[in-house]
Image: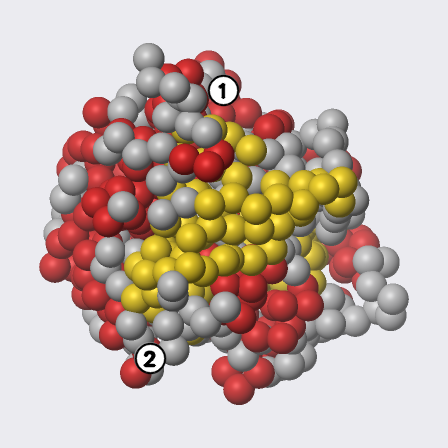
């Protein structure tokens, strides 16, 4: 057995032990390098955001898609990606190349690479981010969202196993509660990091931990890979970079879809040290945020991944104009909401719809898939809403459940300081929709989307309620959900070339410095452009983490 990696003898320092950091460390150690993997949080937080994630991964033309009769191709996926990304800046040169490389990966070796490491996927492929209507519209043209069996923890599992094996053999050393505050350079080359040792903590995974400093540290290595995540947990940074030109003023009220460690501070430090930070105004926040009734981190928000049947209403109860339909175009609807200055919006639906169409993003909200519990999964086909959804209906601060429309509107108005929802407006919206429905869909474009999506077996069986009048008491009670803006992903980040080398202001690689995962905009400084196809964030961490680990290993 080789001697354990001594801190003075590390080849590579990996800064952040989320998914991207774990992948990079495992790849570097596989290549024979001695790795120090540092994180500001404690051991119980290993894996970062990926632990909480739903584990949705985009594959292209997978066996799961083919079994369901979904016809997908590299060409279609690349078209969808580029239309959705909308690259239009000079600094998009590397992000665009990362996007092309990533679509190659997702249509090529991604699934086989993960499958060989033991990962498996739920056989029903979801259709997230369908985008607008029409052949030229952005979004996924077909279902591509593959849920990992075991959700986020299932994505982490193989990489935790690989890292642990290298810890046992002495090739990787883990250092927790090490908050990196900056880089140091020798002869123009990054030669290590320095920072604070934070006091030890026993807080549970995901909870905010103490920032009391007990010591400082300096660590040396031939290369440093930054994998410290995005900025979504730091509302000051989100507001600083908020794209007011495209989205209007930042919402006064936002809730938080990521733990507090997603603070963006190391990204700022690396930028101060000379790295290019590009596209920080491109962000992927959601419009369907609800307050977690059992919060783990401050202002803990859960995102609803909605099916297409709920009516989407503005604060007065008027229907949002088409194409603002649930599950279609996250950024488009965010733009509509923020440019109109709405503080919140509403979903209006009933029990039959919520039972089938509300998926809650997060591993802890899906104990059946996370626990790989087949009997519990089959309960999703039963008559009752899944347990976590029912818990929100019973205890969620944003939920109103009533038997009549009048009582529902009263309940909605009780959730705002001043009553804003007008009963007459809501009644007309609901009756118009129900009338169109009984006439086979008629002129209602949302109903056309529903009918078209139900052509897919997976959508029909698992995801979309049978179209029926909202006011039919057999499908009741009625449900209204107050929706808040939820901060989550950073689409921009540190600019990198295709070897994940961080670029300086002149576009040249900074010797010895690499970046991967969300801190690098999932590759290149923003491989998604303005908008993301869902299931491409974990995938972006896997791909860029692997690239950085391999490239840094070759270079040292
Ligand atoms: C609830 C939820 C659901 C999601 N669902 C999906 C999904 O289904 N599909 C999908 O593709 N994506 C999903 N995502 C997004 C995805 O999980 C993240 O984008 C991804 O995990 C980010 O990984 P990362 O390694 O880049 O960063 P992180 O997971 O944020 O890890 C960064 C690590 O760096 C550490 N760190 C930060 N600063 C420092 C410092 N100064 N010094 C030392 N350490 C530091 C942090 O403590 C952390 O451990 C979801 C996210 C959430 C929160």
Of the pair 471 and 494, the residue shown nearer to us: 494
The quadrant holding residue 31 is top left
In this rendering, is residue 355 above or below 373?
A: below
Q: Which residue is mark 2?
A: 506
State which mark lies toward you, 2 or 1.
Answer: 2
In this rendering, is residue 137 above or below 102?
A: below
Q: Residue at x 38, y 63 (%)?
A: 187
**Can residue 464 be seen at all in this image of the molecule?**
no
Q: Are marks 2 and 1 in contact (CB under 8 Å)?
A: no
The x, y position of residue 186, in whole percent, is 42, 59
Q: Residues within 10 Å of mark 2 (few under 14, many from 20)?
A: few
- How many numbered badges does the structure rendering display? 2
The x, y position of residue 533, in whole percent, is 35, 57
Of the pair 88 and 323, the residue shown nearer to us: 88
Secondary structure type for disc 2: loop
Q: Which residue is mark 1?
A: 371
Question: Viewed as shown, does residue 224 lie left or right of 112?
Answer: right
The x, y position of residue 532, in whole percent, is 38, 61
């Amino acid at each position: 057995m080789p001697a354990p990696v001594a801190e003075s003898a590390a080849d590579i320092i990996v800064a952040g032990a989320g998914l991207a950091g774990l992948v990079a460390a495992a790849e570097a150690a596989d290549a024979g390098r001695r790795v120090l993997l540092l994180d500001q949080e404690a051991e119980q937080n290993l894996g970062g955001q990926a632990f909480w994630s739903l584990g949705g991964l985009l594959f292209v033309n997978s066996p799961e898609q083919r079994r369901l009769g979904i016809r997908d191709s590299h060409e279609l996926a690349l078209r969808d990606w580029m239309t959705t990304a909308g690259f239009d800046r000079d600094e998009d040169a590397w992000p665009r190349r990362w996007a092309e490389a990533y679509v190659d990966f997702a249509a090529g070796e991604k699934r086989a690479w993960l499958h060989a490491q033991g990962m498996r996927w739920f056989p029903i492929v979801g259709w997230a981010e369908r985008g607008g209507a029409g052949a030229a519209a952005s979004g996924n043209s077909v279902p591509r969202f593959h849920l990992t069996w075991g959700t986020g923890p299932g994505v982490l599992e193989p990489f935790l196993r690989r890292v642990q094996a290298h810890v046992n053999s002495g090739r990787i050393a883990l250092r927790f509660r090490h908050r990196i505050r900056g880089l140091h350079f020798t002869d123009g080359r990054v030669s290590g990091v320095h920072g604070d040792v934070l006091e030890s903590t026993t807080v549970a995974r995901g909870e905010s931990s103490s920032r009391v400093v007990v010591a400082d540290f300096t660590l040396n290595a031939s290369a440093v890979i930054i994998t410290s995540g995005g900025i979504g947990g730091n509302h000051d940074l989100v507001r600083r970079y908020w794209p007011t030109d495209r989205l209007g003023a930042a919402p006064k009220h936002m809730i938080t879809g990521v733990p507090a460690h997603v603070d963006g501070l190391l990204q700022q430090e690396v930028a101060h040290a000379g790295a290019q930070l590009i596209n920080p105004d491109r962000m992927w926040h959601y419009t369907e945020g609800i307050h977690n009734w059992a919060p783990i981190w401050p202002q803990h928000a859960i995102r609803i991944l909605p099916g297409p049947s709920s009516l989407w209403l503005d604060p007065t109860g008027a229907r949002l104009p088409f194409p603002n339909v649930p599950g279609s175009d996250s950024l488009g609807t965010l733009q509509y909401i923020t440019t109109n200055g709405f503080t919140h919006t509403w979903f209006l639906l009933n029990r039959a719809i919520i039972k089938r169409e509300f998926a809650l993003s997060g591993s802890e909200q899906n104990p059946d898939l996370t626990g790989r519990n087949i009997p519990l999964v089959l309960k999703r086909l039963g008559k009752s809403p899944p347990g976590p959804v029912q818990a929100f209906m019973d205890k969620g601060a944003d939920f109103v459940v009533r038997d009549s429309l009048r009582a529902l509107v009263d309940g909605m108005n009780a959730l705002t300081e001043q009553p804003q929802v007008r009963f007459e407006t809501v009644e007309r919206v609901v009756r118009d929709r129900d009338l169109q429905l009984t006439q086979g869909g008629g002129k209602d474009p949302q109903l056309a989307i529903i009918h078209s999506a139900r052509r897919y077996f997976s959508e029909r069986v698992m995801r979309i309620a049978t179209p029926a009048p909202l006011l039919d008491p057999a499908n009741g009670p009625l449900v209204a959900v107050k929706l808040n803006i939820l901060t989550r992903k950073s689409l921009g980040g540190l600019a990198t070339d295709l070897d994940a080398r961080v670029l300086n202001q002149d576009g040249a690689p900074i010797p010895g410095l690499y970046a991967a995962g969300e801190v690098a905009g999932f590759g290149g400084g923003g491989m998604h452009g303005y908008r993301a196809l869902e299931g491409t964030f974990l995938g972006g961490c896997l791909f860029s983490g692997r690239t950085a680990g391999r490239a840094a290993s070759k270079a040292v």
